[in-house]
Image (spheres, rainbow, N blue to C red):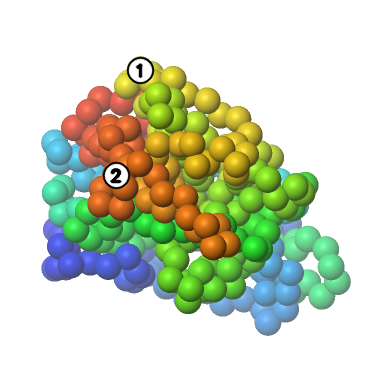
Amino acid sequence: MEKKNIDWANLGFGYMETDKRFVSNFKDGKWDDGVLTEDSKVVISECAGVLQYAQTIFEGLKAYTTEDGKIVCFRPDLNASRLADSARRLEMPVFSEDRFVEAVVDTVKANIGYVPPYGSGATLYIRPYMFGSNPVIGVKPADEYQFRIFCTPVGPYFKGGAKPITIKVSDFDRAAPHGTGHIKAGLNYAMSLHAIVTAHQEGFDENMYLDAATRTKVEETGGANFLFVTKDGKVVTPKSNSILPSITRRSLMVVAKDILGLEVEEREVYFDEVKDFAECGLCGTAAVISPVGKIYDHGKEICFPSGMEEMGPVTKKLYDTLTGIQMGRIEGPEGWIKVIQ
């Protein structure tokens, strides 16, 4: 398939309808084989479980064109595993992890003309998701579900380079200690919308959420894990049962330890110690790492030595190495890259 006539260099981070999407339905206790369809519309009952009780989960990953011209995905098996964990927590049927990866590959192949060329800075964003589709009026899990995958070409998250952002310590809680913070459920993101709109109105780029129980420990933002670097170069990430296990963050920790030879630590991070770190970043699929230059805490500012002009040196090495692996410039650990074409 020839490349679509798209201005790749000026793509934003938004939705563009592509040719095909994957759809599979769960009914009578089993998933069907699924199909690729040109129909982008979802038709469900007005009483569907997803509309009444927010029974929906999702994932996010990307397809890239590498330096040698291959089209690849990055660690889709981990997205499959995380979706399965999310499904179990919300009493939804698990979609086979092997079939998940196959469906991702099939969907990308069906939209190969939308995969941006190497060097454009753009990628093909892939969104798998699942929801309760049959009528549910009593509070209970749905009996029927739909699993879908669509994709859309997106531009680089940061145009002109990743400039450090300013975040605030939120007065809102993201997730309860025994809640659903560790899964990728739509309801978690709905909970964060008011907080992020409020932060933007106040001139901040993101929120730092503290643990709901004691409000003394760093958790994450509305859609990314934290990564800190100590003054002696150790990479530290917060540990909590209510943090989403970011695939990007887990990959960066492997890069730090096994490729760059840095000391790494996953542990509880108390907010009182944040002022002593040299660098701070937010890890996620969209941007890989968003550098943080400043944290605002109710009238007080924490300014990182790395400053507000560019990524800190360790964060930059991590970013360059992981994106190098994704784009085929650097050989990564076995199994990280799934070749599609």
* Residue identified by numbered label 1: 261
Q: Nearer the viewer, residue 55 or 237?
A: 237
Residue 253 in view of the camera? no
Q: Residues within 10 Å of mark 1 (few under 14, many from 20)?
A: few
Quadrant assignment, res 147: bottom right
Q: Residue at x 52, y 73 (%)?
A: 197
Residue 121 x %, y %: 20, 53
Q: Please state which of the two labelled residues, at mark 1 or mark 2, is closer to the viewer.
A: 2
Residue 332 in view of the camera? yes
Q: Name the residue type under label 2.
A: Met
* Residue identified by numbered label 2: 311
* In this view, 52 is above or below 160: below
Residue 201 x %, y %: 48, 76
Which SS class for mark 1?
Answer: loop
Q: Residue at x 19, y 58 (%)?
A: 160
In the rendered view of the protein, which quadrant contains the C terminus?
top left
Q: Nearer the viewer, residue 310 or 74?
A: 310
Residue 184 x %, y %: 59, 52
